[in-house]
Image (cartoon, grey):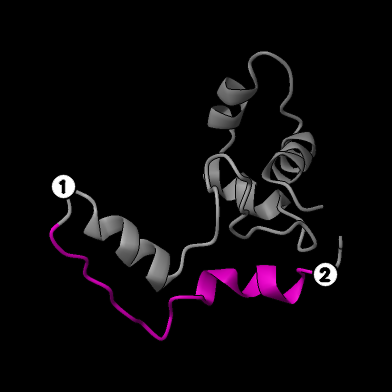
Amino acid sequence: MSSADEIGGAFMRILGVDGPDAVGGLLRVAPDELWQKLPPMLPMAPVIDGDIVPHASTFQTLTSKLAKSPWCDAVMLGQSELDVSTMKQSVTHANVLG
């Protein structure tokens, strides 16, 4: 399972949300229910889909694009030892669905 559509579709099926009102159905699911029903083997990580996220960003690609941008004068980056705490489950189970 590698595409964002496959992962999202699997999650929607687990929640029982389908059809033309899928977005409305998803909005009606309680936030606690979302996390309780999320199986550990479903990869919940960023996906480079070629559309919304067209490619992996690097410092080199970002700086070259931002240097040409009239609207961005500077970029501020930060670091926190807890940055990836929400990704632990994804990394732990990333290869389960292969």
Tag count in the figure?
A: 2
Q: Is residue 19 above or below residue 14?
A: above
Residue, disc 2? 95
Residue 28: x, y in percent?
56, 28
**How packed is label 1: few (under 14 Cα within 10 Å), some, or many (20 or more)?**
few
What residue appears at the point 39 percent right and 72 percent down from the top-left corner?
59
What residue appears at the point 32 percent right and 62 percent down from the top-left corner?
64
Residue furthest left as drawn: 73
Residue 54: x, y in percent?
55, 48
Q: Indicate whether residue 85 is drawn in magenta.
A: yes
In the visual, does 71 lie left or right of 87?
left
- Residue 17: name its quadrant: top right
Q: What secondary structure is found at the residue carrying circle 1?
A: loop
Instruction: For the residues labelled 2 and 1, say whether their Cβ atoms are less than 8 Å apart.
Output: no
Quadrant containing the C terminus is: bottom right
Residue, disc 1? 70
- Residue 5: name its quadrant: top right
Nearest to the observer: residue 35 or residue 49: 49
In the visual, does 35 lie left or right of 3?
left
What residue appears at the point 61 percent right and 45 percent down from the top-left corner?
50
Mark 2 and mark 1 lie on one chain; the one further toward the N terminus is: 1
Q: What secondary structure is found at the residue carrying circle 2?
A: loop
The alpha-carbon separation of the residues under discs 2 and 1 comes to 41 Å
At label 2, the amino acid type is Asn
What residue appears at the point 63 percent right and 16 percent down from the top-left corner?
21
Q: Which residues are magenta?
A: 73-94
At label 1, the amino acid type is Pro
Q: Indicate whether residue 96 is drawn in magenta.
A: no
Residue 43: x, y in percent?
72, 59
Front tag of 2 and 1: 1
Residue 79: x, y in percent?
33, 81
